[in-house]
Amino acid sequence: MIEKINSDLQAISDPARKDLASAARRVLRYIIAEQSEAKTNLLQWIDDYFKTIQPKYSSHLHNETQNAAQFIEEVKPTYSDDDEEVDGRVILRDNFDVIFSTYPEALIFGEDAGNIGDVNQGLEGMQDKYGELRVADSGIREATILGQGIGMAMRGLRPIAEIQYLDYIMYALQIMSDDLATVHYRTKGRQKAPLIVRTRGHRLEGIWHSGSQLGGIINLVRGIHVLVPRNMTKAAGFYNTLLQSDEPALVIECLNGYRLKEKKPNNFGAFKTPIGVVETMLEGHDITIVSYGSTLRIVLDVAKELTQVGIHVEVIDAQSLLPFDLNQDVVKSVAKTNRLMIIDEDVPGGASAYLLDQILNKQDAYQYLDSAPKLVTAKAHRPAYGTDGDYFSKPSAEDIFEAIYAIMHEADPKTFLKLR
């Protein structure tokens, strides 16, 4: 059979790289039991060949220089002694103010970004201060907004394209996937389009303004960072990080967080949220919980309730989905707790399944598990309308409490009696 593989290869007058790799790997099957120098040499040749050839087809999906966003170190927000608390939207506004004064090439445009200062007032007063060219309204044409942003970014500007709601990203997804996400990859790093796409999403109360279809998005826009900050300070930090990098990104602000109070930093423009780094919000020893965005606030509330029944959870904020946990901190947590739950407001099989794949298959966390990993997700449909619609469509505090308790009951039924 090896002779046939050899003769078939020699019969190809102009063999492609695929032909050489395929032939070598098929030969390996027929010498699997050998302990010979020939087998060692063949294995080495295959490894060396792929190290040389694979990058010709798989490199430069992201920036590979020191300007890459993942290499920009975290700078924490600092605070004055008065501990002033303001609406989250004020933190965004004041940080954008510093951005526009620091980066003359920075501009923002999109749906209601200009005259009214965006639908949640995160750009209040910015058009009056910086003019209609730098803080501009656009038509309700998401694909056009993305196309204009790509063009500006490729010509040296630093545009932030505003899409009013995450749900509306669907109208621009083809442009994001086919064009923006591939610029750096298809030119092997010779061109770049560091467009920042700003939007808002996650939990609210409505079928078209509360979608969290991230499972679809993250699997269609590889080449773009997808960032899911839990509050506006984290979001502002992401903008500061991205403007020091030269890569495209999608930043999804929490739609129900603009009026929630946050401590006001005193180093606007300087603090930076790291990309690809998770944050442990609460330490515990019973089970590792991974979540992000608006749902994380519910998880933290439930964690307090769980302590009343003797369950101490470790809560981890994913912060960014693409890339996810470059330092592999989640697996370190699972090694301690031996249990894992991912809580997500996307549909079943969405972002939670992606995170599970990253944790089990990329981080090899399966070896530390004493219980099957569990996913708590939204129902398999768009969220229903109103407060009741949110409660019955997406993971509620009670859903989360009961799911965690059920795992602990399975592990220790004498201590944690059956709840239901």
Image (cartoon, rainbow, N blue to C red):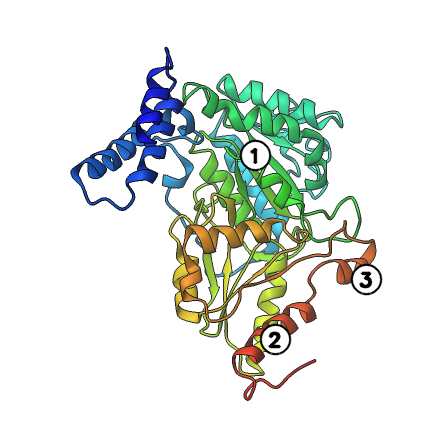
Q: Dividing the image into 4 quarters, which one contains the C terminus? A: bottom right
Q: Residue at x 61, y 37 (%)?
A: 198
Q: Contact (CB < 8 A) between labels 2 and 3?
A: no
Q: Residue furthest bottom?
A: 414
Which residue is under mark 3?
A: 388
Rendered image quadrant of residue 345: bottom right
Q: CA distance from mark 2 to mark 3?
A: 24 Å
User: Is 183 located above or below residue 217 in the figure?
Assistant: above
Q: Dividing the image into 4 quarters, which one contains the N terminus? A: top left
Q: Residue at x 28, y 40 (%)?
A: 31
Q: Earlier in the sequence, mark 3 or mark 1?
A: 1
| Left or right of 142 in this view: 45 | left
The percent coordinates of residue 118 (x first, y second) are: 69, 37
Which residue is under mark 1?
A: 221
Which residue is under mark 2?
A: 406
Q: CA distance from mark 3 to mark 1?
A: 33 Å
Q: Earlier in the sequence, mark 2 or mark 3?
A: 3
Q: Closer to the camera, 386 or 187?
A: 187
Q: Amino acid at mark 2?
A: Ala
The percent coordinates of residue 376 (x first, y second) are: 63, 61
Q: Closer to the camera, 49 or 204?
A: 49
Q: Residue at x 45, y 30 (%)?
A: 61
Q: Residue at x 63, y 49 (%)?
A: 350
Residue 79 in view (yes/no): no
